[in-house]
Amino acid sequence: MTSPPAPRKDRTRRVALTVACIAALALGADGRADVPEEGPWPDMEGYIAALATSDSQTKRDLADSAYRYLEPLFEAHPDRDEEDVTRVVDSLRRLLRTEKDDWIMKVVLDTYVFADGDVLEPLFLDALMSPSPNLSWYGIQRFSYVEYAEALPGLRKAWRREERPWVQVDLMAALAKQGSKDEMEDFIELAQGTDSDLSVAAIEALVEIEDRRAVSPLARIVRHGPDAARLAALGALVTWPLDR
């Protein structure tokens, strides 16, 4: 018989104890336990170690606490250097590549997909390149929000194979955010298509790219397109730079 889920307070206490125990397991060469370092940074390192080594249910509970434990990466850390930051991010990247339960890294990525700061871009790049459709979508969403040149090859590859319309919407935004014009003809075709969501997303991508090849198709959409696309195309043309 399946046990009912633990109350939230109990899960939070269990997560904190798991992180504290794993963070304290620093043994010297002679087998004696070192005095564990205290503070948010060692707690973060203990948290990531717990994500990598705990049982499945504990990992799921831990994933819900990502915001609490990973915040030091986004704060001032004068007692740490770039190597420390890289080491932590690399630990998360290894976890993404090896964890079989997509849900665990999905929760972690969801916590930071639209966060300011570029410290986790390598992690989201790995997500973009992941064979998991669930994780790759988080990479696509992240790069629809920030410019990151290293993401462009992966985004182009994803565009050639992606068939989920809701992901194609984010993919167009991501490609446009990186300034790619290789997909212009695809965007123009979708802008004039019958799928309202894809049409509006394609128009928004064309606005981001600002290539004059889009002006005539946008004008046709204003005259003959469905309502949502007409409004989007009209807004695009009204704000189109005069020198483009």
Image (tube, rainbow, N blue to C red):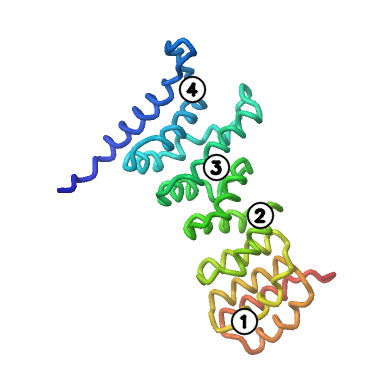
Disc 1 to disc 3, C-alpha distance: 43 Å
Q: Which element type, helix, strand or loop, lies under badge 2?
A: helix
Q: Which is in the foreground here, disc 4 or disc 1?
A: 4
Q: Which element type, helix, strand or loop, lies under badge 4?
A: loop
Disc 3 to disc 2, C-alpha distance: 15 Å
Disc 2 to disc 4, C-alpha distance: 34 Å
Q: Which is in the foreground here, disc 4 or disc 3?
A: 3
Q: In this figure, what is the number of numbered marks? A: 4
Where's residue 179, x and y in %? 73, 62
Q: Which residue is mark 3?
A: 93
State which tag comes first along the sequence, 2 or 1.
2
Rendering quarter of residue 16: top left
Horizontal side of 63 relative to 237 (left or right) equals left
Closest to the observer, 240 or 196:
196
Disc 2 to disc 1, C-alpha distance: 31 Å
Q: Which residue is mark 1?
A: 230
Horizontal side of 144 relative to 97 (left or right) equals right
Residue drawn at x 54%, y 32% is 72
Q: Which element type, helix, strand or loop, lies under badge 1?
A: helix
Q: Which amino acid type is shown beneath numbered disc 1?
A: Arg
Q: Which residue is mark 4?
A: 39
Q: Which residue is mark 2?
A: 151
Say which quadrant the C terminus sits in. Answer: bottom right
Residue 172 drawn above or below residue 134:
below
